[in-house]
Amino acid sequence: MERSKFLKVTCPRCKHVQIVFGKSTSQVKCTECNYLLAKPTGGKPKIRASGSVFVNMAVPL
């Protein structure tokens, strides 16, 4: 079973939807307005965006 997940987050400033890795180790900024969406904390990042939803990104073999 997978332990890592991807999150679909919505930028609170420009409402752009972006996919973010659930255990990112670097800052993630919105590609449209450069707003900081996720900040690393050592484990799971602190999500600063609104409407984060887990997304199943399974790739068929």
Image (cartoon, rainbow, N blue to C red):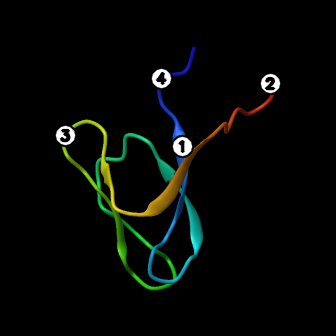
Identify which amino acid the numbered label 3 is placed on.
Answer: Gly
Tell me which corner region of the image, top left, top right, bottom left or bottom right, holds residue 60: top right
Q: Which residue is mark 1?
A: 6
Residue positioned most to the right = 60
The numbered mark, 2 or 4, whose residue comes first in the sequence reads: 4
Q: Residue at x 67, y 39 (%)?
A: 57
Mark 3–mark 1 CB contact (< 8 Å): no
Q: Gap in Å between the C-alphas at discs 2 and 4? A: 19 Å
Image mark for residue 24: none
Q: Which numbered mark, 1 or 2, is in the foreground of this view?
A: 1
SS state under label 2: loop
SS state under label 1: strand
Identify which amino acid the numbered label 1 is placed on.
Answer: Phe
The numbered mark, 1 or 2, whose residue comes first in the sequence reads: 1
Where residue 16 sits: x, y (%)? 58, 75
Residue positioned most to the top = 1
Q: Which residue is mark 4?
A: 3
Q: Which residue is mark 3?
A: 42
